[in-house]
C-alpha cells in the first residue's frame, strides 16, 4: 500500500518527500563523525607548546590516558596528577584492557613537533596528567575525537582546541 501511495505522487511531491527524509537523516546524524571515530578508533592530533619557564625550569613528566570504559574515565577525572603518578602501575594492572597510555618527559622551552596519537575502538575520553612541582590537580580532560593544543606554562598547563 505504501508503494502505491508513493507511486501516485507527482515528481515534485516525491522530490519534496525525499528532501525531507534527507534533512531528517542529516539532523539525526550530527554526532555521526564522532560516533564513527569511536566505533573504528582514530588519530588524535596534538600540538605542544612548552614555556621556557615551565614547571619552574624543571622537566615535566606528562601522561595521556585514554579510557575505554565510562566508569574508568570518571575515576580518572577525580584523580590529581600526583595520585596518578604514584598509583599508575597498580591502576594499569587493575584495568589492563580499560585504558591506554602515552608517556613523555619534556624540558622547559623544548620544541615538540606535532604528533598524532592512535587510539583503539571505543574510546570514551581522555585525561592528561602533568607532574608539576607546584600544588594543584594538574589534570585536564581531553576529547580524543578533537584535535588539541597543549600549553605548558610555569605553574600549570592548559588544553585548548587546535586552531
Image (cartoon, rainbow, N blue to C red):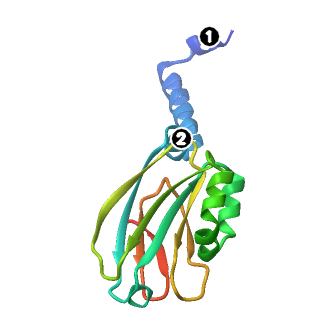
Frontmost residue, 151 versus 8: 151
Distance from Cα at disc 1 to Cα at disc 2: 40 Å
Q: Residue at x 46, y 57 (%)?
A: 146
Q: Residue at x 56, y 11 (%)?
A: 7
Frontmost residue, 147 versus 82: 82
Q: Is residue 51 visible?
A: yes
Residue 104's x, y, as percent?
Answer: 41, 66
Residue 5's x, y, as percent?
Answer: 64, 13
Q: Nearer the viewer, mark 1 or mark 2?
A: 2
Neighbor class of circle 1 (other Cα within 10 Å; few <14, some 14-19, many 20+) is few
> In the figure, 131 relative to 2: above or below?
below
Q: Quadrant of the N terminus?
A: top right
Residue 31's x, y, as percent?
Answer: 55, 47
Q: Is residue 113 left or right of residue 129?
A: left
Residue 112's x, y, as percent?
Answer: 30, 69
Q: Quadrant of the C terminus?
A: bottom left
Q: Pointer 2: what residue?
A: 121
Q: Is residue 70 left or right of residue 106?
A: right
Frontmost residue, 62 versus 66: 62
Neighbor class of circle 2 (other Cα within 10 Å; few <14, some 14-19, many 20+) is few
Residue contact at pointers 1 and 2, CB within 8 angstroms: no
**Mark found first going from the N terminus, 1 or 2:** 1
> In the figure, 135 relative to 3: above or below?
below
Secondary structure of the residue carrying tag 2 is: loop
Q: Pointer 1: what residue?
A: 3
Q: Residue at x 59, y 15 (%)?
A: 6
Amino acid at each position: 500500500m505504501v508503494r502505491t501511495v508513493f507511486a501516485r505522487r507527482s515528481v515534485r511531491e516525491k522530490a519534496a518527500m525525499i528532501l525531507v527524509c534527507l534533512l531528517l537523516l542529516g539532523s539525526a546524524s550530527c554526532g555521526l563523525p564522532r560516533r564513527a571515530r569511536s566505533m573504528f578508533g582514530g588519530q588524535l592530533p596534538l600540538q605542544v607548546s612548552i614555556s621556557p619557564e615551565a614547571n619552574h625550569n624543571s622537566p615535566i613528566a606528562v601522561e595521556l590516558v585514554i579510557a575505554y570504559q565510562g566508569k574508568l574515565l570518571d575515576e580518572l577525572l577525580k584523580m590529581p596528577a600526583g595520585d596518578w603518578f604514584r598509583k599508575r602501575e597498580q591502576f594499569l594492572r587493575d584495568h589492563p584492557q580499560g585504558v591506554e597510555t602515552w608517556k613523555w618527559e619534556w624540558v622547559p622551552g623544548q620544541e615538540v613537533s606535532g604528533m598524532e596519537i592512535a587510539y583503539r575502538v571505543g574510546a570514551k575520553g581522555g585525561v592528561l596528567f602533568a607532574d608539576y612541582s607546584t600544588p594543584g590537580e594538574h589534570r585536564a580532560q581531553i576529547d580524543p575525537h578533537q584535535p588539541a593544543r597543549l600549553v605548558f606554562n610555569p605553574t600549570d598547563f592548559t588544553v585548548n582546541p587546535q586552531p
